[in-house]
Image: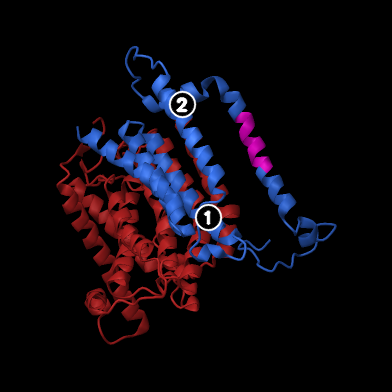
Chain colours: A red, B blue
Amino acid sequence: MADGTTMVSSVWALAAAALLGALGLYAAVVDGALTARSSGAAANGATTPLVETARLLRQRRRTTVAADTLLWRVGGGGLIAVALLMITVVPLGHWTLFDLDVGVAWFNAMDVMVWALVWLVGWGPNSVHSLVGGYRFLAHGLGYELPLMFALVAPAIAAQSLRVGTVAAAQHGLWFAVWMPVAFLGYCLGVVAFSVWGPFSPALGTDIAGGVAAELSGVDRLVFQAGRYLLLSAGAAFAVPMFLGGGAGPLLPEWVWVLVKTVVVLTVLVWLRRRVPAWRPDKFMEVGWMALLPAVVVQDLVVAIVAVWRG
Amino acid sequence: MIVHVVFWIVAVIAVLAGAAVFWVDSMARATYALAVSFVAVGVAVLLMQQNYIGVVTILMMVMEMAVMAVYMVMFMGMNPALMPMSMVHDKRWALAAAVGMFAVLAAGILLIDWPARHGKPAADVTAALGEALMGPQMLVMVVVSPVMVSTIVSAIVLAARRTRYDRFGDDLKHRPADPQPGGVGR
C-alpha cells in the first residue's frame, strides 16, 4: 500500500472486538463515575457497569403481548454487530482488518444501519412508549444524518480517497480537525446521535417511560446498552484516522497514539452527556437542516477549493 | 472459490428475502425482509468488485426502508399496519403478471446471444461504469436533478395545509404562531 497500511489476518478480528469491548467498558466506567460524582453518591460509581451487568444477567426477561421477538432481538444485537463492522476499516497504526477502498462509505453505511436497528428495538415489544421512542430516533436521524454524511465528505475530498488509511496518511503535519473544524464537529455530533447519547437521548426519555428501552430487561437491556457504548467507542475510533491524524505523534508507536486519541475523544463524548441539554427531535430537525447542513456544505466547498488550489 | 460460494449464498438470501416480503403478515417484517434482500444484493455487488456501488446500495436501501416503515405505518388507513395483515392484494392478476414477467425475463436470459468478453476490465470498474452510464448524458442528469428537487418542493407546497401566508400573515411580517416551533426560532 502506498500509505503504509497492511491488512492483517482475519484472526485479529477477535483482538479488535476485545479492544472495542474494552473501550466500551471504559466509556461505561467513566460515565458511572461521573454520574456518581454529580449525584453526590457515597459509593464510587466506577463499578456501576459491572454491578449493572451482573444485575441484568440475573434478571428475568420481560415478555409483552404479541411482541415481534425476531425483529426485537435483531434490533438489539444488531447494534453490537454494526459497531464491530465499523471498526473493521479503522486502521490501528499500520494494521487494518479490512483495507476497503471505500472505507469511508462503508462506515457511513454501517451508521445508517442504526436507523433501522433502533427503530426495530422500539417496534419489537408491541408497546406504545417504545414505538414513540423509535420514531423520535428516526426524527433525530433525519436531522443528523445529512450533516454527518457531508462531514465525512470533507476529509475524503482533501485526501482524494475514500480509503481510511489514505485519509489518515494525507494529514501529515496538519490534522483535518484543525483546518476543517465544522466537519469535525458535525461528525462528532453524528457519533453522539447514532449512539442515542446525551442530547440525542430523548428516544430513551423518562417522559416516555424509557422510550425504546422501555420494555427491555435482563440480557436484552444489557445488549442494547452495550451496543450504545460500543457505537460511541467505534465512532470515537473512526474520528482518529479521519480527523486526528491517525497514528501520527511523537515518541510512542503509531498504534498507541491511535488508542490514546480514541480514548481522549471517547472521554470527551462521555463527559459531554451531562453538559448539553437534550434536543427535542422537532426542534433539532430545523437546527439540522437550517444551520448544521449549510455550515457543513460550506465547509465542504472550502475544502474542495483548497484541494483544487493545491492541485 | 470462497467468493463463488458466498455469492451464491447471498444470491439465494436475496431471492428468499424478496419472496418473504409477501409471505410475512406484518408491515415491519415485510419492510425489513426487503431491506435484507437489498443488503444481500449490495454484498453481491461488492463481490463483483463494484465496491462503491455495493456499499452505497446497502446505505441507501437501509435508509429508505427505515423511512418507508415509518410512512407505511403512518399512512395505512385505520392503522392495520400495527396488526397482522396480508401483504398481497388482487392475487390472481398479480400472480399472472408475476409469472408472465418471470417467463419473459427468463426467456430473454436463455435466448439472448451473450457476447464474449473483449479485452480486459477497466482498472477502476466503478469509474468506468459511471462514465458509461453518465458520460454522454451528463447535461441531462444535471438538468434533471433541479427539476426533481423543484417537483418535490412544489408537491409539498401543494399538499401542505399551512403556507407561509398562514404563518407570517399576508404581508409576511407577522410572528408565526406555530403549533410546533422550530429550533432556530423563525
- Label 1 is found on which chain of the structure? A
Question: Does residue B148 lie above or below A293 as drawn?
Answer: above
Please give left or right for residue B31 compared with residue B78 in the image: left
Q: What residue type is disc 1 on? A: Leu
Which sits in the foreground, A100 or A311? A100
Secondary structure, mark 2, is helix
- Alpha carbon separation for disc pair 2 and 1: 28 Å
A120 part of magenta stretch: no
Who's the residue at 32% across and 71% down the image? A221
Which residues make up the magenta segment? B142-151
Question: Does residue A285 lie above or below A198 as drawn?
Answer: above
Q: Residues within 10 Å of mark 1 (few under 14, many from 20)?
A: some
Who's the residue at 55% across and 50% down the image? A293
- Which residue in the protein does label 2 denote? B130
Count of marks, rendered view = 2
Please give left or right for residue B113 compared with residue B86 in the image: left
Q: Which mark is residue A217?
A: none
Q: Residue A14, percent across and down?
A: 17, 53
Q: Residues within 10 Å of mark 2 (few under 14, many from 20)?
A: few
The answer to whether residue A59 shows anywhere in this view is yes
Q: Residue B177, percent across and down?
A: 74, 68
Quadrant position of the C terminus of chain A in the picture:
top left
Q: Residue A183, percent across and down?
A: 46, 48
Q: What residue type is disc 2 on? A: Gly
The secondary structure making up most of the magenta span is: helix
Which sits in the foreground, A182 or B123? B123
Quadrant position of the N terminus of chain A in the picture:
top left
